[in-house]
Image (cartoon, grey):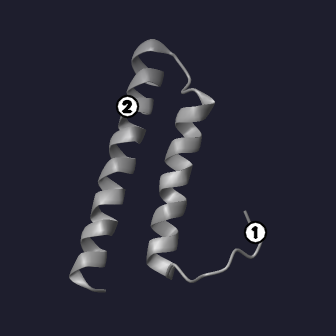
Amino acid sequence: MSQSKREQVVSHLRYIRQELREMHQGVMEDGLLPEAGEVRGVMAQMEALLELLEGKGRKKDGDG
């Protein structure tokens, strides 16, 4: 994996980790479930990370 791609992956993972920590904190401290938009945002980041790892030329195969 090239250094640039590795840095992008690390950046995506840090963002996802932070978002999940905030959601978890809200659940544990306040008993509040995250809003659907927040969950969709993290899912979109995970999709972007997957696309980055698999290559941007990958075509969707309808498995999601």
Q: Secondary structure at mark 1?
A: loop
Q: Which residue is mark 2?
A: 22
Count all numbered tags in the image, as a single digit.
2
Tag 1: Cα neighbours inside 10 Å, few (<14), some, or many (≥20)?
few
Amino acid at circle 1: Asp
Can you give x and y, in whole percent of width and height, for residue 38 in the image? 52, 34
The correct choice, above or below, for 53 with respect to 37 in the image is: below
Q: Secondary structure at mark 2?
A: helix
Can you give x and y, in whole percent of width and height, for residue 17 in the image? 35, 47
Q: Which mark is residue 5?
A: none
Q: Residue at x 30, y 53 (%)?
A: 14
Gap between marks 1 and 2, in whole Å? 29 Å
Q: Residue at x 54, y 27 (%)?
A: 34
Query: Farthest residue in the front direction?
Result: 57
Q: Which residue is mark 1?
A: 63
Tag 2: Cα neighbours inside 10 Å, few (<14), some, or many (≥20)?
few
Q: Quadrant of the C terminus?
A: bottom right
Amino acid at circle 2: Glu
The correct choice, above or below, for 17 with respect to 53 in the image is: above
Query: Farthest residue in the bottom direction?
Result: 1
